[in-house]
Amino acid sequence: MEDSIGKVVIPGDILQNLDEKKGKIKVTVGPGLIRDGSHIAVTKSGILRHREPSVFWVDCHQKRYVPARGDNVIGIVTAKQGDVFKVDIGSSEPASLSFMAFEAATKRNRPNLNVGDCVNAKLLVANKDCEPELVCIDSYGRSSGLGILPNEGFLLQCSIGLVRQLLRNKFNVLTFLGKAIQYEVAIGMNGRIWLHCHTVRETIAISNAICRSELMSDEEVQIMSKKVVDSLQGFE
Amino acid sequence: MSCLKQSNLRGFACEQSCLTRSDGSATFNQGETTVLAAVYGPVEVKLSKEHVEKAAVDVIYKPKVGIPGCKEKATEQLIKSTCETVLLVALHPRTAVVIVLQEMQNTGSLLSCCINACCQALMDAGINMRCLVCAVTTTVDQEGHIILDPTSKQEEDGKAVLTFAFDSKTNGVIMTTTSGIYSSQEYQECLLSAQHASAKIFEFYRDSILKKLSRVS
């Protein structure tokens, strides 16, 4: 197990002597791993990752989103059904979002949300057997960054691997570009990125830069971001 | 006593993520035979196909020319049951995994090429799998010799065509389909040589994934 961390694993691989190495600490297995009797079996092809003390998962470049509890996602409202909104989050089933799950919402004071609007929400219920449920407030009733996304933004779709990369890596394309260009961004774990810049030119440049950064190393990203910023400011 | 006439598989090649809109895709070549596979899933499922305890696997096979007929429907069923065995369908209840296969060129061993393309596309889509699957086609010619990975002509001239699918964990048989007349001994020998050849395909799978992911690790 220890020696395969950071290496490529494929479905059907068995990770052994996991419990011995970790002694009495409970081992947590994340996506791409499954317990198979006394062993851990790999179910996705990707790179095995590890976080101290004992969390293991497989990093996989997948495009389809499978809801997980606690994920921040960007959804598009597709319907109003009585007390709930139906929100498309890219999963196999639309999620439900109660109109009471917004900051300062009351029975009288409903949020102004229409079909086609984007919301940044958190998954409260994400179970394979039932419908996913979204909320736009935390447990204190505060919005904490969640809520309706303004209409003037741009929504782009990318792979889930790229989103994880952007959220994990501090030195990503967003920070490099952010030093020179002002913009607002919301990243959903479902592979959707909402972007708001001052001009259309900037929006196009940044969205292309984000999509291109997927298979680049940190240095390459830095060079690419510099080029983007230069060309935006008129230097070629 | 039959003997192995052609023990080598034709050269194979694979390209993953060749389509942009699908969740996972792959082209697989075996010699000149080429199949393009696209995988969508887990996606919303039609109410009539929904299973409460598992994902529904839906295989759509598109021939190079014409509309799919009975033969193609039978192929779809075979591929569907093979994929259902290796996929962890219980992890995504009330969803569907849709696999679309497009025949690009057929110069023999089409079914095995389809299954191999499927497996690559499923891996690319990141759908949970118990293990990998690969398929090998063999044929028994008129003299009773066994030919691995036959061309269309060899398939036509032979007296039987046998296709086997194996899993990567135990190397056991998942699926077998045959046509023509053969003895039980010939069947066993075909099975053995196909099983032997499957190791090479699994090795190729691992190499292709290593190559693809070495850039990001």
Image (tube, rainbow, N blue to C red):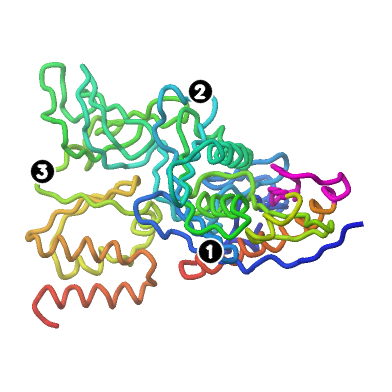
Residue A194 vertical placement versus A213 (above, below): above
Quadrant of the image containing the C terminus of chain A: bottom left
Would you say residue B183 sits in the magenta stretch?
Answer: yes
Marks 1 and 3, how far apart in space?
43 Å
Quadrant of the image containing the N terminus of chain A: bottom right
Q: Is residue A95 visible?
A: yes
Residue occupied by mark 3: A151
Outermost right residue: B1
At a point 51% along the width and 23% down the height, the residue shown is B52
Foreground label between 1 and 2: 1
Residue occupied by mark 1: B14
* Chain ID at mark 3: A
**The residue tagged with tag 1: helix, strand or loop?**
strand
Within the image, what quadrant is residue B18 found in? bottom left
At a point 71% along the width and 52% down the height, the residue shown is A16
* Chain ID at mark 2: B
| Circles 1, 3 touching at the beta carbon (< 8 Å) | no
At a point 69% along the width and 52% down the height, the residue shown is B168
Residue A118 vertical placement versus A82 (above, below): below
Q: Which mark is residue B180?
A: none
Q: Which of A122 and B154 is in front in this view?
A: B154
Please, what is the three-letter code of the amino acid marked with disc 3? Asn
| Circles 1, 2 touching at the beta carbon (< 8 Å) | no
Marks 1 and 2, how far apart in space?
35 Å
Residue occupied by mark 2: B52
Within the image, what quadrant is residue A181 found in? bottom left
Q: How crowded is mark 2: few (under 14 residues within 10 Å), some or many (20 or more)?
A: few
Q: Give the range drawn in magenta.
A: B161-188
- In this rendering, would B135 be left or right of B41? right
**The residue tagged with tag 2: helix, strand or loop?**
loop
Marks 3 and 2, how far apart in space?
38 Å
